[in-house]
């Protein structure tokens, strides 16, 4: 029988009080904070906020609990932005929206950092259902600038090795969500598409947890998707909020892994969905597939949720949990 699991791709909005406290401490907006060198007062704010968002996920009965990535002021670029071998430069638009990050410029070998592992170690003290979150290697390389490795394929492989080393230091976790929007928005061309799959494989091999490669802001090109299925991963995530037909086509034409992640709740829109509507959206997908005997179906938002007001974010956690429960009662 299919198991329905409620979760998120992480990158949560800060609680309102934490935004205010951080603004007072730093004197400017959150996206201008310099990650990685916070003083004790700022660290204390993040620790308290982390405890709060973990508590909110427990209160909502979410099946998998994210650390929240509240310190990720540079969003998916964060693991490089705080690295000793990286210089952060000007502010760059984050994909095609009104969020920004500091451009990470890699200037030396990407050795071990441990920044994300430290965050997860703190979170692991508060939950037994930990879900780790990282940028996928292709997206992280796409968001960065290379001034050290020399060519695109070598740089992508180096980023994958770096992320794999970080994962090896993680505390025990149930799942690892690798966020790969760049596979959609800036699809790799011939040759690099296969290298992107190999890079994902490198990171996935570093953990014994289930690995979900979550893609969003559209649908993967057919060849990119076919190569991604060659990686040793447990599930691909599909953004059924932004693009329904092309994502459905990929599933119909190329199949899927034994598990699947469905982005059915809008991570950017403040409209709060009804749990029954989310369940119906899942059924709409499954009714159109030749095979629906997935071992696990992850129900999630289509994108990160840091775009949302904090109260709406809380409400959407409850929607996901309720939708998973409904789906278990009336499976597709």
Image: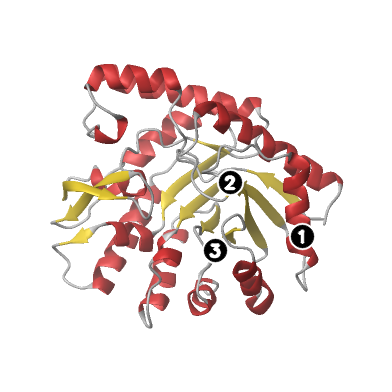
> Is residue 35 something one can see in this rendering?
no
* Mark 2 element type: loop
Specify few, some or many for label 1: CA neighbours under 10 Å numbering under 14, 14-19, or 20 or more. Answer: few
Q: How far is disc 3 from disc 2 in space, using C-alphas? A: 24 Å
Specify few, some or many for label 2: CA neighbours under 10 Å numbering under 14, 14-19, or 20 or more. Answer: many
Residue that mark 1 sits on: 284
- Which quadrant of the view contains residue 244? bottom right
- Which quadrant of the view contains residue 23? top left
Residue 17: where, in percent of width, then height? 42, 17
Q: How far is disc 1 from disc 2 in space, using C-alphas? A: 17 Å
Question: Closer to the camera, 195 or 76?
Answer: 76
Residue that mark 3 sits on: 233
Residue 130: where, in percent of width, then height? 54, 38
Q: Earlier in the sequence, mark 3 or mark 2?
A: 3
Who's the residue at 62% across and 58% down the image? 240
Indicate left or right for 315 with 10 as reference.
right
> Is residue 330 something one can see in this rendering?
yes
Q: Is residue 156 above or below residue 120?
A: below
Who's the residue at 64% across and 74% down the image? 249
Which numbered circle lies on residue 246?
Answer: none
Q: How far is disc 1 from disc 3 in space, using C-alphas? A: 25 Å
Residue that mark 2 sits on: 266
Q: Earlier in the sequence, mark 1 or mark 3?
A: 3
Who's the residue at 47% across and 31% down the image? 123
Question: Closer to the camera, 94 or 141?
Answer: 94
Specify how the rendered protein is coloured.
Answer: secondary structure
């Amino acid at each position: 029988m299919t198991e329905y699991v409620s979760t998120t791709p992480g990158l949560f909005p800060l609680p309102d009080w934490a935004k205010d406290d951080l603004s007072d401490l730093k004197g400017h907006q959150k996206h201008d904070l310099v990650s990685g060198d916070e003083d004790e007062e700022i660290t204390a704010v993040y620790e308290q906020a982390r405890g709060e968002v973990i508590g909110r996920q427990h209160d909502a009965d979410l099946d998998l609990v994210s650390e929240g990535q509240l310190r990720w002021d540079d969003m998916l670029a964060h693991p490089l932005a705080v690295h000793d071998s990286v210089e952060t430069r000007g502010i760059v638009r984050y994909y095609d929206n009104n969020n920004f990050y500091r451009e990470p410029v890699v200037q030396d070998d990407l050795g071990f950092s441990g920044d994300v592992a430290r965050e997860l170690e703190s979170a692991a003290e508060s939950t037994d259902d930990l879900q780790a979150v990282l940028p996928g290697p292709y997206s992280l390389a796409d968001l960065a600038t290379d001034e050290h490795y020399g060519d695109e394929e070598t740089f992508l492989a180096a980023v994958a090795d770096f992320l794999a080393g970080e994962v090896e230091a993680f505390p025990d976790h149930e799942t690892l969500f690798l966020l790969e929007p760049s596979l959609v928005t800036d699809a790799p061309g011939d040759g690099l598409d296969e290298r992107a799959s190999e890079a994902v494989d490198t990171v996935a091999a570093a953990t014994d947890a289930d690995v979900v490669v979550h893609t969003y802001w559209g649908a993967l090109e057919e060849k990119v998707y076919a190569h991604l299925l060659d990686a040793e991963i447990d599930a691909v995530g599909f953004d059924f909020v932004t693009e329904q037909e092309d994502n459905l086509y990929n599933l119909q034409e190329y199949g899927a892994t034994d598990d699947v992640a469905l982005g059915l709740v809008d991570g950017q829109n403040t409209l709060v969905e009804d749990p029954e509507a989310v369940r119906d959206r899942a059924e709409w997908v499954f009714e159109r597939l030749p095979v629906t005997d997935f071992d696990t179906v992850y129900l999630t938002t289509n994108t990160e949720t840091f775009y949302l007001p904090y109260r709406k974010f809380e409400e959407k956690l409850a929607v996901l949990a309720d939708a998973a429960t409904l789906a278990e009662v009336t499976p597709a």
